[in-house]
Image (spheres, helix red, strand yellow):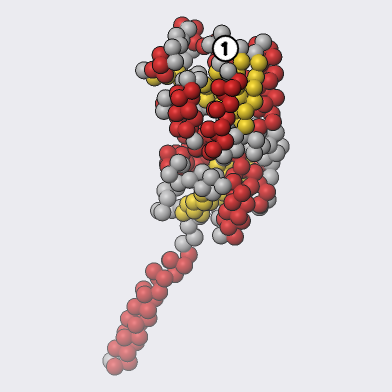
Amino acid sequence: MQFDQLRRRQLIMLLASAAAAWPLAGRAQQPAMPVIGFMNVSTPAAGTSLEAAFRQGVGETGYIEKQNVTIEYRWAEGHHDRLPALTADLVRRPVTVIAATGTLAALAAKAATAAIPIVFETAGDPIKLGLVASLNRPGRNVTGVTQLSSELVSKRLGLLHDLIPTATTIAFVVNPTDPRAESQTEDMQEAARALGLQIHVLKASAEDEISAAFAGLVQLRAGALVVGPSDLFRRRYGQFVALAARQGVPAIYQYREYAAAGGLMSYGASLTDAYRLAGVYAGRILKGAKPADLPVLQPTKFELVINLTTAKSLGLTVPPGVLAIADEVIE
């Protein structure tokens, strides 16, 4: 009898010990939470809506930040020379995938690692930039989303000419530190020759240089302005709109945000949608997809936005033909 009681006590103690160990074993077997490294040349304040769009895209694949995925944010605060160090930090972390948003961030990420998957967002041609070998078959560890905005500079010139056919001298402002600046300028000059227009190229690579470029518009007596794609210019869109209003210069921009803030018109793809799609690709890679098998995503729609209030303040009447093709009219 005593022997049976002893065996029962031993069995109970054994089961209790096993039960206590099960939760620990279960936790040990759970996989580590994947980490996305999100990198951008801008500031957290300027990138709030874009960051949210990226998280939305990641969420569409089933990953929710702080629940089953960690996102490490790295902002260069407008200093593109910090990007290599920020990328190196993410590589050392190490992260599961790098979301390099913006052309300069994408180039820095590609230069830093050939092993960690990279999802880029760029307004330029990723083939010309050297990010991928092909849009359909990117190859290696890099894929992403392109808005092809740099390829639309000639289209923007044409739209501006349709709106203001009397303006024969047009200014074109570019950021000389942007890797797309040279090809943008060549495309613009070629389009100007085809339309019989004279183009003056202005350069700005810092905030104070933007103001100086607008001062040059007065001396050139330019009748209109085309603003080239640039991460710097996007961050300073309010400054561009304010200076254009002060100088009374009709201008066309890359993103809707300019027109919404009071710019005359914009033409391009949705930036927030590009960030959302980058998030979707980051999530798909977390699920096992390989960047080499994910074709570079391209916009299916470009939107023309016209601010009629600004047009009236500039004394412009928007031709019916231009209004007819506008996707959005702000009044």
On the rendered structure, is 67 left or right of 152? left
Residue 260, percent from left and from top: 41, 26
From this view, report whether residue 203 is shown above or below residue 116.
above
Viewer-proximal residue among 91 and 186: 186
Residue drawn at 32 percent across, 90 percent down: 6
Foreground residue among 301 and 2: 301
Q: Check the image and report above or below for 247 versus 67.
A: above
Q: Residue furthest front?
A: 219
Secondary structure under the numbered disc 1 in the rendered image: loop
* Residue at the (42%, 50%) spot, across then down: 65
Quarter holding the N terminus is: bottom left
Q: Residue furthest top?
A: 320
Left or right of residue 154: residue 280: left
Residue 207 showing in the rendered view: yes
Q: Which residue is mark 1?
A: 167
Please state the horizontal and vertical placement of residue 81, each as a whole percent of the image: 61, 49
| The C terminus: image quadrant | top left
Q: Position of residue 240 (x, y in %)?
A: 49, 30
- Residue in the image at 43% along x and 66% along y: 27
Instruction: Using the rendered view, name the quadrant where residue 8 is placed.
Output: bottom left
**Which class describes the residues within 10 Å of circle 1: few (<14), some (14-19), or many (20+)?**
some
* Residue drawn where x is 66% and y is 52% of the image: 113
Amino acid type at circle 1 is: Ala
Q: Is residue 295 visible?
A: no
Which is nearer the eye, 256 or 253?
253
Coordinates of residue 170 in the picture (x, y in percent): 60, 18
Considering depth in this image, is 91 or 290 the residue closer to the camera?
91
